[in-house]
Amino acid sequence: MLLFSGCTGGDDDRQAIQTVMSQRQQAFRNKDINVYLSLISPHYQDQGQDLAAKKRELALNFASFEQVDYRSDGYKIEVNGKFATVSGTYRLKIVRKGQVLELAGKESLHLRKEGKGWLIVGGL
């Protein structure tokens, strides 16, 4: 399920944001840290973490995952000029050291249009 709302932002912006979300899901499933990191802005800042700290955290996590299954249960895209928020629910199943961990929850990612594309600036 995909819902669109917002003040401004055309179909091209919404499609580009949807592409980022799809690439993020695939990067998770494929444990492809390089693709995942390519979706994050150099201006990332969230909960006291900048891009360098987030990269270190993600690299450690991805390296420890034996298996990953990430699924979005649907999300809503809100665009306001050069900023967007993507909110929704997810299910994440990871195998680490032979143990299965299953998580389900809500997430809210913040994106910013930089150059010709959208990148994640917060919420990871």
Image (cartoon, rainbow, N blue to C red):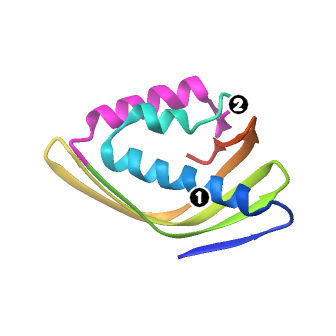
Residue at the left extreme, as displayed:
98
- Identity, as a three-letter code, of the amino acid under mark 1: Gln
User: At which x and y percent is residue 30?
Assistant: 31, 45
Q: Residues within 10 Å of mark 2 (few under 14, many from 20)?
A: some
Which residue is at 81% across, 60% downward? 9
Q: Is residue 85 left or right of residue 96?
A: right
Tell me, yes or no, whether the highlighted magenta stretch contains residue 24: no
Mark 1 falls on what kind of element?
helix
Return the residue at label 2.
43
State which region is magenta: 44-67
Which residue is at 16% across, 41% downward? 97
Which residue is at 48% across, 49% downward? 23
Q: Residues within 10 Å of mark 1 (few under 14, many from 20)?
A: some
Identify which residue, 52 or 14, lies in the foreground: 14
Mark 2 falls on what kind of element?
loop
Whether the residues at callouts 2 and 1 have beta carbons within 8 Å, the answer is: no
Q: Which mark is residue 122?
A: none
Tell me, yes or no, whether the highlighted magenta stretch contains residue 65: yes
Q: CA distance from mark 2 to mark 1?
A: 20 Å
Say which quarter of the image contains residue 88. bottom right
The mark that comes first in sequence, 2 or 1, is 1
Which residue is at 54% across, 26% downward? 53
Return the residue at label 1.
18
Relative to 48, say whether 120 is above or below: below
Mark 2 or 1: in front is 1
Identify which residue, 72 or 98, lies in the foreground: 72
User: At which x and y percent is residue 2?
Assistant: 58, 73
